[in-house]
Image: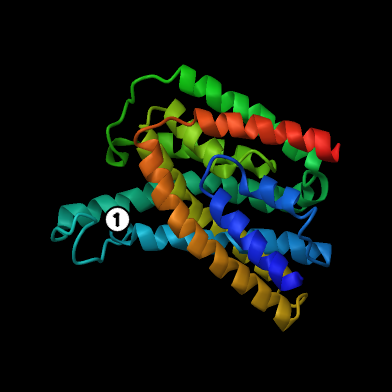
Amino acid sequence: MAWFNVFILGIVEGITEFLPVSSTGHLILFHRWFQLSPENFQNAFDVCIQLGAILAVVVLYFRKLNPLASVDQDGKAMTPKKRRKIVELWAKVLVGVLPAMVLGLLFDDLIDKYLFSEKVVAVTLVLWGIVIILMEKRVRPAKFQSLEEVPYSYALGIGFFQCLAMIPGTSRSAATIIGAMTLGLKRVDAAEFSFFLAIPTMLGATLLKVVKNVHGFDPSQWIMILFGGLVSFITAYLVIRVFMNFIKKHDFVPFGIYRIIVGILVFILFL
């Protein structure tokens, strides 16, 4: 049953990591039926398998993120100017990750202890569902037509929005996308920057969990984490492609409605 639970949780992570619905919140809820033990392993598992989903971004956007590639994402020859723009994009991503890096190191243990609960998830699911709907109803013309135009100060601002996702049920994707759109990015650019910002953020969070538990888990538990990460990678790879095609033609209102419905169900079922 443990391996079946790992498989199901990997799928849940892969589906929800990049959608504005909260992967952590969904994992907390699914642990009601698909538990792993002991609890400290379960908490570390939830964080570490996110790295599998993040690797899906690296694969899908490899040319767009790799300044050493011979051709760009459009299959055209890479020029020094294009390489410089990729390096600048990475610099903006690293600036954006600074707030989460600092606050994560300071409050990681407190968040695990006090905020990982169905009650917190239910409240944040509903609250951010409402925020998403209101944001889409008040959407304004974008200030920037591409990620290249986004200044470093705005990248830092998006990073502070990302910190809101430390509260389970908020959704890192929702917080960063909403923050980016509020600051003037187009919907697709906001989603892509959210994906890119996840790479160092989740890598850092995973390394933190590994360092804390490197001697605390046996080999079979580490294999479970690797298997869960592989499942989340495959699932996320498929979901990202569908999600990006969806938001080119639609807004985020359906995700806001979904969050409110799920939040209400959590109140009814668990509280």
Give x and y (percent) for residue 173.
Answer: 53, 42
In the depicted structure, whether residue 30 falls above or below residue 217: above
In the displayed structure image, the side of residue 35 where residue 96 appears, left or right: left
Give x and y (percent) for residue 246.
Answer: 40, 40
Residue sitting farthest toward the bottom: 219
The residue pinned by badge 1 equals 64
Give x and y (percent) for residue 105.
Answer: 66, 53
* The C terminus, quarter of image: top right
Q: Residue at x 75, y 71 (%)?
A: 2
Residue sitting nearer the eye, 183 or 37: 37
Q: Which amino acid, mark 1?
A: Lys
In the displayed structure image, the side of residue 270 where residue 72 appears, left or right: left
Residue sitting nearer the eye, 105 or 200: 200
Label 1 sits on a secondary structure element that is helix
Residue sitting farthest toward the right: 271
Q: Residue at x 17, y 52 (%)?
A: 81
In the depicted structure, whether residue 126 falls above or below residue 46: above
